[in-house]
Image (cartoon, rainbow, N blue to C red):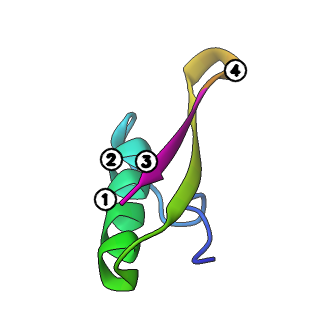
Amino acid sequence: VNGSSLAAGHPFAATGGRILASTAKLLDQKGSGRALISICAAGGQGVVAILEK
């Protein structure tokens, strides 16, 4: 909904924290729901998480 952090520029490992915090804030503002986030890591690794409030 609000895009990614690719254009923001970030130090290594800061992207995940930003995406997680932004998603948690959106869920809090909405009051309830689920969100799917994906976070890339160095070397082609990645993490996917479902957040629920």
Mark pair 1, 2: CA separation: 6 Å
**Prevailing secondary structure class for the magenta stretch in the rendered image:** strand
Mark pair 4, 3: CA separation: 15 Å
Tag 3's secondary structure?
helix
For residue 45, the mark is: none
Instruction: Give the residue at mark 1.
Output: 21
Image coords of residue 48 (percent x, y): 59, 35
Instruction: Give the residue at mark 3.
Output: 15
Q: Do the residues labelled 3 and 1 touch (CB within 8 Å)?
A: no
Image coords of residue 33 (percent x, y): 48, 67
Amino acid beneath label 3: Thr
Q: In which quarter of the image is residue 40?
A: top right
Instruction: Give the residue at mark 2.
Output: 17
Tell me the residue at 47%/58% (across/down): 9
Amino acid beneath label 1: Ala
Label 2, residues with CA under 10 Å away: few <14, some 14-19, many ≥20: few
Q: Do the residues labelled 2 and 3 touch (CB within 8 Å)?
A: yes
For residue 44, the mark is: 4
Amino acid beneath label 4: Gly
Tag 1's secondary structure?
helix
> Bounds of the magenta span?
47-53
Magenta stretch holds residue 52: yes
